[in-house]
Image (cartoon, grey):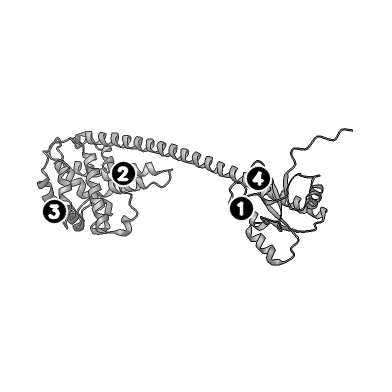
Amino acid sequence: MQSPPPNNNLPLVMLVDDSAANLLAGKAALSEGCKVLTAGSAALMLETLEWSKPALILLDVDMPVMNGFEAIGILKARPETRDIPVIFLTAMNDGASELKGLALGAVDYIAKPFSPPLLRKRVELHLLLNEQKHVLEDQKRVLERQKGELQNYNDNLQAMVEAKTKTIIELQHRVLGAMAGMIESRDGVTGDHIGNTRHLLRILLSAVVRAGLWSQETSEWDIELLCQSCQLHDVGKITIRDSILKNPGRLTDEEIVEIQQHTIRGMEIIARLEEGGDDSAFLRYAKVFAGYHHEKWDGTGYPFGLSGESIPLLGRLMAIVDVYEALTAERAYKKSFSHDDAARVIIGGKGTHFDPALVGLFEDNEDLFRQTGK
C-alpha cells in the first residue's frame, strides 16, 4: 500500500537540542501536524536558517558552546529571523530563568522531559497565534493600502471640487462684471468704475482691520468676498430711466427722487436673489452696499436718513469710496476731478457726509488712492 503524498501546506517547525533522544521524541510528537527540521546545536540552527525559515523554533536552553539564551539573542538581532516565535525547552525549573528567556523574546517555556501531547498542543497554539498575527498584519497592510487609495481619491476629488469651484467663481465674476458693465454704460461712466471701486474698497477695508477698529465685526469679514459683492452697489440703477441717468443737465425734484430710489430698488433686487436659497454672505454684503452707500454721517443722506454709527459700517465705507470714484471718473455730464481735488472733498466732508474715523484712515492711505491713476 502506497503512503499518502506529503502535505506541503503543513507548517515548518525547527527543533534544536543537543540530545538526539529529545530530537527523535520531539519529531515523533510533532510530525503528524508539522514538518520538522532538527538541529543538534545552536550553530547548526543558525546555518540552517540561512536557507529555511520555519514558522516556529523549539530551542533548548542548556546546550554546549552556545546556549539557548545566547542563540535567541542572535535570532532577535537579525531582521530575517527576529519575527520567528521561539519556545524554550528546558529542564531548568526556576522562575528567574523563565523571566530571563521571556525578556530575551521567547513566547513560551516547555519543561523537559516534555509530554508529547502537551508539546503538540502548545506548538499548535503558538502556530495558530502566529498565523492569526500574520492575518492581522496582512489585514493591516490591506487597510493601509486602502487608506492610501482612499486618500488619493479624496485628494483627487478635492482637486476636482476646487477646480470646479474656481470655474464657478470665475463665472460668477464674469457675470458680475457683465452686469456692472451694463450699469456703467447706462450711467454714462467712462473707465473702470466698478474695478476701481473694488480696489479702493479693499484699501479701506484692510486699513480698518490693521487699525483694530470695530474688531468684533471685522473678525467675521472676508475681504475678497466683500470686494466682489460691492460690485452690486449700484445694481438698482438698472431700473432707472436712461433719460435721467444720462441727463447732462440739472435734474428736476421728481427726477432726483426717482434716481435716489436706486438704493431701495437695489436692495429689493438682491432680496429676490436671496429668496429660496441658503444664507449667502455675498448677497448680505451686497444688500448693505446697495442700500446704505448714500447715507450721510449727519443724517442728511438717503434713503433712510440714518446718522452716525446707526449707518452700517460697510455703508459708511462704501460712501467714501463711491464719492471718491464718482468725482475722479469722467461722465457724460462732467469732467473728472484730480486726486487732490477729490481728496479735499472727502476730507471736507469729515463729520458731516463721512464717518470721521474712516476719513482719518482715508488720509492715512491717501497715497494708495492716488495710485489708482487719477
- Residue neighbourhood size for the residue with mark 1, other residues' Cα within 10 Å, grouped as few (<14), some (14–19), many (≥20): some
Secondary structure of the residue carrying tag 2 is helix
Considering every residue shown, the one lying at the far bottom of the view is 95
Q: Amino acid at mark 2?
A: Ser
Question: Can residue 298 be seen by looking at this rendering?
Answer: no
Q: Earlier in the sequence, mark 2 or mark 4?
A: 4
Q: CA distance from mark 2 to mark 1?
A: 73 Å
Q: Read off the residue under disc 4.
A: 47
Give the number of the disc on residue 347: 3
Q: Percent position (x, y) of residue 132?
A: 68, 48
Front position among marks 1 and 4? 4
Q: Residue at x 17, y 42 (%)?
A: 372
Q: Earlier in the sequence, mark 3 or mark 2?
A: 2
- Residue neighbourhood size for the residue with mark 3, other residues' Cα within 10 Å, grouped as few (<14), some (14–19), many (≥20): some
Q: Earlier in the sequence, mark 1 or mark 4?
A: 4
Q: Earlier in the sequence, mark 3 or mark 4?
A: 4
Question: Can residue 330 be seen by looking at this rendering?
Answer: yes
Q: Nearer the viewer, residue 306 or 102?
A: 102
Front position among marks 3 and 4? 4
Image quarter in which the C terminus is found:
top left
Q: Read off the residue under disc 2.
A: 229
Secondary structure of the residue carrying tag 1 is helix
Give the number of the disc on residue 74: 1
In the picture, residue 271 is in which quadrant?
top left
Q: Amino acid at mark 4?
A: Glu
